[in-house]
Amino acid sequence: MKPISSPAAEISRGIQGTNPQWSERARTRLNRLTKPLGSLGSLETIAERMVAIGEEESFRELRKMVYVFASDHGIAAEGVSAYPKEVTRQMVMNFLSNGAAINVLARLHGARLVVVDVGVDGDLGPVPGMVDRKVRRGTRNMLHEPAMSEGELDRALEVGFEQAESAHEEGCRLLAVGEMGIGNTTSASAITSVLTGQAPGLVTGKGTGLNPEAYAHKIRVVEAVVERHFPGGEEGSDPLKVLRSVGGLEIAAMTGMMLGAARHRIAVIVDGFISTAAAALAYALEPRVKDYLFAGHCSEEPGHRFLLDFIGLEPILSLHLRLGEGTGAVLAMPVIESALRVYSEMATFASAGVSGATS
């Protein structure tokens, strides 16, 4: 696997949008199935998009994977989370011991889980099942300086590209992308505010469950961060500058993975708020990546809906989740599989000898 030489310069190379002819082909078949036109609702849209991505009619077996990228955030020092930063390392170890929600759901739905350390502030050691791609021990405190240097940003993006390449080599067709990192909802809130032009107070949520006083403090921190790096709003800011200034190493890696997956025509299910912040950055860098993105769900974080609207994605599920880890994305996998099975296996009016609609 060869990482691209300059992610900032070559980030969208090779990404093509899906072929409208395959969408039309899928729509024609859907309209011939033994059901009223459009009666399967979003399942039909999902099937049409998956056929256009894969450029094939039969999906009897999907190789599914879920990647969880982990990193710490310097902004955690400002008291923006209900949990100490040590929880990032502890939860990574929990993933590797098969004790987290994502382990249960990935196992249930047949998705291979890959955990990637891109910036955990601690030594995890050579643990089976973990991919060690640590760029540095967490980002810098973005309240006082940019979260990453240009070199660190490039390396984090390359981590994502490398993992997309690995998924492609394994024959992955459906990819869920999640994260773990104490303080990362603060980063995602700043990203959302800058990309969408919304006030920090509208897009910042309670994250891990802050009390009212701590929540108000978090909003003030996000306001200060945005004002420091993007005074006056700077609408239309360079997505790479946004990512370097107020992002996270795991968010950069997810951004790289989504772009890499689009390059290899792999369908990506975006998880919650932080994962969708990465998707929004990938979309801002290369709008054609949208053709390969599905929104697994809409979380309880207020900024999530703004990001989904920014990209133009409708969530598959709405379960009031706010956990992250890729849980909402994996929960959407059986819905996508159901859409494809209906598309592939239902009889047409002609094959079943059923009369079609007369008006």
Image (cartoon, rainbow, N blue to C red):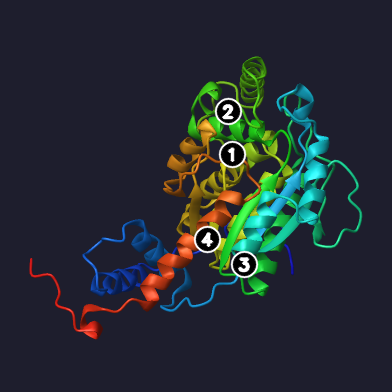
Q: Which mark is residue 333?
A: 4
Residue type for callout 3: Gly
Label 3 secondary element: loop
- Name which residue lies at 88% across and 43% down: 122
Cα–Cα gap, marks 3 and 4:
10 Å
Structural crowding at the residue carrying mark 1, measured as other residues with C-alpha within 10 Å and reported as few (<14), some (14–19) or many (≥20) = some
Q: CA distance from mark 1 to mark 3?
A: 22 Å
Q: Name the secondary structure under disc 1.
A: loop
- Mark nearer the N terminus (3 vs 4): 3
> In the image, what residue occupies the spot 76% across and 29% down?
76
Q: CA distance from mark 3 to mark 2?
A: 32 Å
Helix, strand or loop at disc 2?
Answer: loop
Q: Which residue is mark 3?
A: 110
Compared with residue 238, is residue 96 higher up or lower down, i.e. above or below? below
Q: Position of residue 202 (x, y in %)?
A: 50, 24
**Residue type for callout 1:** Arg
In the rendering, at what x and y percent does residue 331 appear? Answer: 54, 55
**Quarter containing the N terminus:** bottom right
Q: Which is nearer the N-term, disc 1 or disc 3?
A: 3
- Work out whether residue 283 or residue 278 is closer to the camera in this orientation and state it: 278
**Badge number at residue 322:** 1
Q: Which residue is mark 2?
A: 205
Where's residue 131, x and y in %? 80, 59
Task: Tell me the kind of residue under disc 4.
Answer: Met
Label 3 or label 2, whichever comes before in sequence order = 3
